[in-house]
Image (cartoon, rainbow, N blue to C red):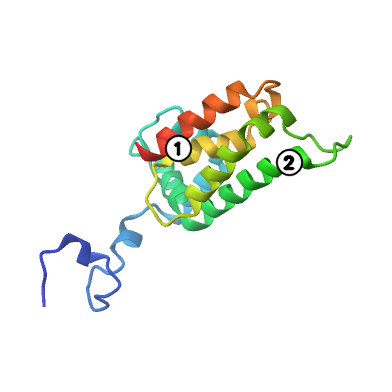
């Protein structure tokens, strides 16, 4: 029986719907998805800086990747590892984050990881910001002796997750 409910189009409870796979059919091609994954660092920085997700197919594909449960879980894992890194023994081979910055922001890092694990929609800009914080070896997580810059970055990321 046809319905006017827009949510019914992609709802799995309507397996006979001809539009069941609409999101896959209308989404980016496999080549664009691969290119977005390969260029994720640049695309994440662009999204973190406020790029419009509809500006290009690459940014749109990366936005979709950042919204996936597996990517959010991977970033949450990284935030938790970052929060625990202040307890790790320093070595010559590994470059570790700033101990003071991490200790001063440990609870915020863990709260943000928990937010990523919840099954609630989050804005890609905030998720991208968190990924940049994790992966930018020149950023405040690694080079902030006081922890103040990391605090500001985490506050901006948290606000960007919700708006």
Label 1 crowd bin: few (<14), some (14–19), many (20+), radius 10 Å? many
Q: Which residue has dot 1 on it?
A: 126
Which residue is at a point 53% across and 44% down the rendered structure image? 111
Q: Which mark is residue 85?
A: 2
Q: Is residue 8 left or right of residue 150?
A: left
Mark 2 to mark 1 CA distance (whole Å):
22 Å
Q: Is 51 on the left-hand or right-hand side of 70? A: left
Quadrant of residue 119 within the rendered picture: bottom left
Q: Residues within 10 Å of mark 2 (few under 14, many from 20)?
A: some
Tell which of 101 and 44 is nearer to you.
Answer: 101
Please state the horizontal and vertical placement of residue 12, each as a whole percent of the image. 30, 72
Q: Quadrant of the C terminus?
A: top left
Tell me which residue sits at (40%, 29%) in the image.
50
Q: Residue at x 37, y 50 (%)?
A: 121
Residue 28 versus residue 47 in the image, above or below: below
Query: Toward the viewer: 46 or 30?
Result: 46
- Which element is circle 1 on? helix
Q: Is residue 25 above or below residue 144?
A: below
**Quarter of the picture holding the N terminus:** bottom left
| Element type where label 2 sits in the image | helix
Expressed as whole percent of the image width and height from the top left, the position of residue 117 reads 50, 54
Tell me if I can see residue 119 in this picture: yes
Q: Earlier in the sequence, mark 2 or mark 1?
A: 2
**Tag nearer the camera, 2 or 1:** 2
In the depicted structure, whether residue 90 falls above or below residue 3: above
Is residue 98 visible to the viewer in this orientation of the structure? no
Task: Give percent across and percent down for residue 161.
Answer: 41, 39
Where is residue 30? Give x, y as percent.
Answer: 46, 56
């Amino acid at each position: 029986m046809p319905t006017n409910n827009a949510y019914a189009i992609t709802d799995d409870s309507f397996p006979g719907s001809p539009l069941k796979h609409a999101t896959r059919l209308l989404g980016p091609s496999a080549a664009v998805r691969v290119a977005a994954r390969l260029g994720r660092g640049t695309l994440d920085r662009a999204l973190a800086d406020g790029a419009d997700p509809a500006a290009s197919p690459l940014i749109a594909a990366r936005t979709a990747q950042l919204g996936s449960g597996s990517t959010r879980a991977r970033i949450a894992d990284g935030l938790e590892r970052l929060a625990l890194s202040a307890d790790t023994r320093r070595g010559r081979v590994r470059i570790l984050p700033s101990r003071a910055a991490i200790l001063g922001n440990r609870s915020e890092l863990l709260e943000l990881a928990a937010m990523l694990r919840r099954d609630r929609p989050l804005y890609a800009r905030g998720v991208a910001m968190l990924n940049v914080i994790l992966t930018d070896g020149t950023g405040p997580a690694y080079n902030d002796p006081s922890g103040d810059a990391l605090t500001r970055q985490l506050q901006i990321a948290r606000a960007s997750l919700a708006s």
